[in-house]
Image (tube, rainbow, N blue to C red):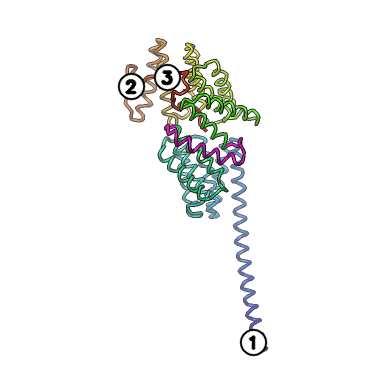
């Protein structure tokens, strides 16, 4: 009996030694992982801080170092996070092809580690949808926003704000292709979700901005004006008067007044919007260019053609930064300037600008156009009617 007990003690000692070494081994692995993870974390955080400060050159350098560190240490989830961050940076600097590659790689890793029904996967779908939206791949963009929405719905109330944000993003695309009724349902739902937390959070404000743009498109000017004036009040109360979002609201209110022939009301808002964009380091080039064009439309409507030409030129020059990314807007705004030149009898100026347009069109395999078959005015004349429908052109969406 005593011998049996002694043997059991020996076995237990051996077992304890085995457990001891296993624990030491696992601890060393965890320590190594934590060490590698912390190094990646430090670099990635520096990249995020530089990105927040809009120092994109430094941010990209840090992100590339973080990606190298994550690959070297075989940190899959961390690698996906930095790839996603760098993809977002590429969106900001209008490098959409590079952004697509990076976010797709991040998505592939996230699907491998997390499975389909995870918030990080939904985030990747949302970000990739933004790339496709910016690249005018509208169907692909809508499909991905819907995928992200379905995941957030499956995850429950905890992710309601992310669900609301994605609904707003989807509505932006739907407004561009004038699916107004569906967009309105998504915006109402987004507002209901986000207002559970507060009525002046960024998601609610973006939803309100898009809803006002939608009402403007439908010709419901009174309701749209009320929302825009409320957004301006909120912006002032929250010291956001020098932000991109505030400039967008001012631009849209000016468009609203212009559509109603209320030019004197529109002028101060469009001028303020342009001044805000001028003083910001922002990649919101499309809306900035549109604001100058709106100013030109106001001048033209009142016969101030010289001032209108200057504003049109300013808008087009902003789009020169990346014609490939703003092709349709560049061509349309150029047509407006050509038509104005013709209206003023400046045939040589109109022909010179049309030659530039035709070079750009030919690079895309499109046929040349002449002054005789130049498209008519693209942007609608004003109307005092409260029920005339308008397009979303030159309105800044969230």
Q: Image quadrant for the N terminus?
A: bottom right
Please say if 231 is above or below 340: below
Label 2 packing within 10 angstroms: few (<14), some (14-19), many (20+): some
Residue 224 % position (x, y): 52, 27
Q: CA distance from mark 1 to mark 3?
A: 100 Å
Residue 359 sits above or below residue 116 on the image:
above
Q: Please state which of residues 258 and 35 is positioned toward the viewer in this rendering.
A: 258
Q: Using residue 345 as the reference point, say whether residue 285 is left or right of it.
A: right
Numbered mark located on residue 369 in the image: 2
Q: CA distance from mark 1 to mark 2?
A: 101 Å
Please identify the quarter of the rendering in which residue 196 is found.
top right
Q: Does the magenta-highlighted stretch encompass residue 296?
A: no
For the residues labelled 2 and 3, say whether their Cβ atoms are less than 8 Å apart.
Answer: no
- The mark nearer the N terminus, 1 or 2, is 1
Q: Which residue is mark 1?
A: 4
- Where, by quadrant of the figure, is residue 228 drawn? top right
Residue toward you, 391 or 93: 391
Q: Nearer the viewer, mark 2 or mark 3?
A: 3
Q: Which residues are magenta?
A: 176-202
Comes first in the chain, label 2 or label 3: 3
Q: Which residue is mark 3?
A: 336
Image spot of residue 258 (x, y percent)? 50, 19
Q: Decide: few, some or many residues near mark 3? Use Cα within 10 Å; few <14, some 14-19, many ≥20.
A: many
- Mark 3 falls on what kind of element? helix
Is label 1 in contact with label 2 (beta carbons under 8 Å)? Answer: no
Q: Residue at x 37, y 24 (%)?
A: 359
Taking the image as shown, residue 278 lies to the left or right of residue 354, namely right
Q: Residue at x 56, y 21 (%)?
A: 269
Q: Which residue ends up furthest to the bottom in the rendered image?
A: 1
């Amino acid at each position: 009996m005593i011998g049996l007990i002694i043997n059991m003690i020996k076995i237990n000692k051996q077992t304890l030694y085995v457990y001891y070494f296993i624990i030491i081994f696992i601890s060393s692995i965890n320590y190594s992982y934590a060490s590698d993870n912390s190094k990646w974390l430090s670099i990635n955080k520096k990249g995020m801080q530089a990105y927040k400060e809009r120092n994109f050159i430094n941010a990209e350098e840090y992100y590339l170092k973080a990606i190298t560190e994550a690959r070297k240490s075989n940190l899959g989830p961390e690698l996906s996070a930095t790839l996603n961050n760098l993809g977002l940076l590429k969106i900001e600097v209008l490098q959409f092809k590079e952004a697509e590659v990076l976010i797709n790689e991040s998505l592939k890793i996230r699907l491998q580690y997390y499975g389909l029904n995870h918030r990080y996967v939904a985030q990747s779908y949302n970000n990739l949808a933004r790339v496709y939206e910016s690249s005018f791949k509208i169907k692909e963009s809508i499909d991905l926003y819907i995928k992200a929405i379905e995941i957030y719905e499956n995850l429950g109330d905890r992710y309601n704000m992310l669900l609301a944000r994605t609904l707003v993003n989807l509505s932006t695309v739907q407004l561009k292709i004038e699916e107004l009724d569906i967009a309105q349902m998504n915006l109402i739902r987004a507002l209901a979700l986000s207002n559970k937390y507060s009525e002046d959070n960024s998601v609610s404000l973006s939803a309100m901005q898009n809803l006002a743009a939608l009402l403007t498109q439908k010709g419901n000017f009174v309701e749209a004006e009320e929302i825009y004036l409320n957004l301006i009040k909120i912006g002032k109360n929250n010291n956001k008067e020098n932000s991109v979002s505030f400039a967008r609201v001012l631009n849209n209110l000016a468009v609203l007044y212009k559509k109603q022939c209320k030019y004197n009301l529109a002028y101060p808002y469009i001028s303020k919007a342009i001044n805000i964009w001028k003083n910001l380091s922002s990649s919101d080039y499309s809306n900035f260019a549109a604001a100058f064009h709106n100013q030109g439309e106001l001048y033209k409507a009142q016969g101030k053609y010289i001032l209108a030409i200057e504003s049109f030129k300013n808008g087009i020059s902003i789009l020169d930064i990346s014609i490939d990314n703003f092709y349709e807007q560049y061509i349309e705004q150029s047509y407006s300037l050509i038509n104005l030149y013709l209206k003023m009898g400046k045939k040589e100026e109109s022909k010179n600008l049309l030659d530039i347009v035709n070079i750009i069109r030919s690079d895309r395999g499109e046929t040349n156009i002449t002054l005789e078959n130049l498209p008519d005015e693209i942007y609608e004349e004003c109307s005092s009617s409260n029920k005339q429908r308008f397009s979303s052109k030159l309105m800044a969406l969230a």
